[in-house]
Image (tube, rainbow, N blue to C red):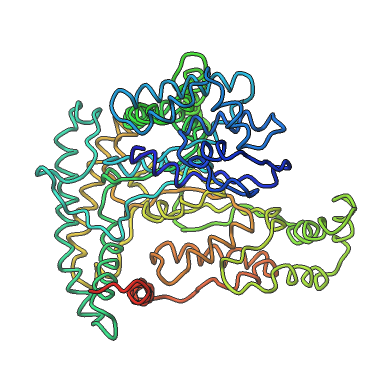
């Protein structure tokens, strides 16, 4: 198999439980089936060495058959010459033209089965890995806004310096619309200036931190990594949102189809160009799953529907034209929360253990005393020994909405939480920025302000004509507004995870404040958040790097590795 297919087949596991029919195979049948399953005699097994489209088609047929999955593959796919199964599987090990033919035949195979036995959900049973490189930080947020079915992993601003100049050019996105406009020189000069400033801060900030935090008991590797992460944390505020980055994606076919449809409908050219490039590559591995996102029958009408939401911008201006922002610079506001939260949660806790309707249980809980409700809630979260012990779904019945004003770097980190609702406003410079205290202490504040203010001037000029494209030039240290609506269960996860010692100090502060707001209105419900870390730390990565050292030593001992 090709390297790509090997990766997909290893990671995409299909587990089948309780097939209900005991299958016995002849020795000849076993020899045929063995390459495609991890075992032939258990109720739980994984598929391997099969193209993604074949997996989807196989499960489509399986869902409407009384046979076991292995028997379906053998009887209805392998043994039927008209399905072309042997040719498809054999040719996926080849290269060049044969591989292209194999994909085409697999697509025909999938559609033949889908007509009789499947629906759109079958596209969730096949997936692909996709690497997307040299795209802007704005584009990664559009991609990562997909909450279900897509698993992204992005290049970090925390562990990598962005001072490289491959081909003599800094790594930032050169938007075609800007490059074709009168703002091209202004854009290039401003972006170069920001990257020059960022690059010039690396060494003095590193020396400053090493003087302030000398190595005390850490390995050289751990100390260097800790200082490097701290430098990156501090100076990332200078990086513009147009900074190029890479993101690796794994997703199922249905999720990719929806993501591409949204990207084709996006008003920014980068997203539309990226959608076309992504679809072109996905067609080579999961063609039937992404064929509709830009077709005339399904894709384009859906794009038109999604594109219509951008017309709300004009309506929004008309409705809100007489509303002034005043001087509201509060970083976090709790806008809305459930007033009868305890009743909802306690009723939901009791419901699965009862045969009564929810309305009757809520009536009973509403008559309980606070102490009685607290007893139930405490019992529900009792025994949590670490943050990975998630509270149950009863906590999903209570919601909070927060309006946040924070820098774009914080938004990038918090946006990765998917089990919540969040939307941001356009990136702008109007809300200002904060100067990191370390930049002040290292006597770099004047140069920092000069760079940030110059970026604001460029943004204002470009945004008068190109408000969407002007976002590329805004440094990540500028504040933006976004809102989050999340349930109590997700709040536990967010507050406990994002206050961990090794977290970035700015998002740690946000998570701490979210916890405080919840505790103010629902002290009993917040009582179970035992793993929120309210401390401040000078070197956030210090203990994490020490733990990595221990793991390295354990691996050396286990496998006999030598330095």
Front residue (pair 486, 542): 542
Front residue (pair 556, 342): 556
Q: Is residue 290 left or right of residue 340?
A: left
Front residue (pair 31, 14): 31
416 w.r.t. 214: above or below? above
168 w.r.t. 522: above or below? above
Image coordinates of residue 211 in percent, x first then y, are 20, 80
Residue at left offset 36%, top offset 39%:
4
Q: Is residue 438 left or right of residue 91?
A: left
Name the image quarter holding the C terminus: bottom left
Q: Is residue 453 left or right of residue 138?
A: left
Image coordinates of residue 547 in percent, x first then y, are 38, 75
Image coordinates of residue 429 in percent, x first then y, are 33, 47
Image coordinates of residue 426 in percent, x first then y, are 40, 40
Q: Is residue 19 left or right of residue 206?
A: right
Furthest residue in direction top, as rendered? 296
């Amino acid at each position: 198999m090709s390297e790509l297919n090997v990766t997909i087949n290893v990671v995409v596991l299909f587990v089948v439980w309780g097939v209900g029919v005991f299958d016995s195979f002849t020795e000849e049948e076993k020899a045929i089936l063995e390459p495609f399953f991890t075992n032939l005699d258990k109720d739980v097994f994984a598929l391997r060495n099969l193209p993604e489209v074949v997996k989807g088609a196989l499960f489509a047929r399986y869902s409407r058959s009384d046979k076991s999955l292995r028997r379906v593959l053998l009887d209805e796919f392998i043994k039927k010459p008209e399905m072309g199964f042997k040719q498809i599987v054999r040719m996926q090990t080849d290269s060049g033209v044969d591989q292209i033919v194999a994909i085409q035949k697999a697509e025909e195979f999938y559609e033949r089965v889908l007509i009789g036995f499947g629906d759109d959900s079958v596209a969730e049973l096949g997936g692909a890995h996709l690497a997307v490189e040299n795209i802007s930080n704005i584009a990664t947020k559009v991609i990562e806004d997909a909450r279900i079915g897509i698993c992204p992993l992005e290049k970090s601003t925390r562990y990598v310096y962005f001072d490289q100049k491959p081909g003599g050019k800094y790594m930032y996105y050169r938007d075609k619309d800007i490059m074709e406009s009168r703002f091209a020189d202004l854009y290039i000069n401003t972006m170069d200036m920001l990257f020059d400033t960022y690059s010039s801060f690396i060494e003095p900030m590193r020396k400053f931190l090493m003087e302030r935090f000398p190595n005390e008991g850490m390995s050289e590797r751990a100390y260097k990594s800790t200082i490097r992460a701290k430098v990156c944390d501090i100076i990332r505020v200078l990086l513009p949102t147009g900074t190029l980055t890479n993101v690796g994606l794994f997703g199922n076919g249905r999720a990719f189809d929806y993501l591409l449809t949204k990207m084709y409908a996006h008003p920014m050219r980068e997203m539309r160009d990226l959608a076309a490039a992504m679809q072109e590559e996905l067609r080579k591995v999961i063609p039937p799953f992404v064929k509709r996102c830009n077709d005339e029958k399904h894709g384009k009408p859906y794009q038109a529907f999604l594109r219509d939401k951008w017309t709300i911008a004009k309506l929004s201006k008309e409705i809100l034209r007489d509303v002034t922002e005043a001087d509201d610079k509060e970083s976090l506001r709790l806008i809305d929360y459930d007033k009868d939260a305890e009743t909802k949660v306690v009723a939901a806790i009791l419901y699965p253990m009862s045969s009564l309707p929810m309305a009757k249980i809520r009536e009973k809980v509403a008559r309980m005393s606070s102490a009685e409700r607290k007893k139930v809630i405490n019992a529900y979260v009792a025994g949590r020994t670490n943050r990975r012990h998630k509270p149950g779904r009863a906590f999903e019945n209570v919601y909070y909405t927060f309006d946040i004003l924070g820098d774009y770097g914080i938004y990038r980190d918090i946006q990765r939480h998917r089990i919540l609702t969040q939307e941001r406003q356009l990136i702008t410079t109007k809300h200002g920025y904060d100067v990191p205290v370390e930049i002040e202490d290292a006597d770099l504040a004047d140069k920092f302000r000069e760079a940030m203010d110059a970026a604001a001037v460029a943004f204002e000029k470009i945004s008068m004509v190109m408000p969407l494209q002007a976002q590329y030039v805004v440094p990540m240290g500028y504040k933006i507004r976004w809102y989050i609506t999340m349930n109590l269960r997700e709040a536990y996860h967010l507050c406990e995870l994002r206050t961990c010692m090794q977290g970035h100090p700015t998002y740690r502060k946000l998570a701490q404040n979210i916890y405080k707001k919840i505790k103010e209105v629902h002290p009993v419900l917040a009582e179970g958040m035992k793993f929120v870390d309210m401390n401040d730390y000078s070197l956030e990565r210090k203990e994490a790097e020490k733990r990595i050292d221990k793991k390295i030593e354990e691996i050396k001992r286990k496998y006999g590795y030598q330095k």
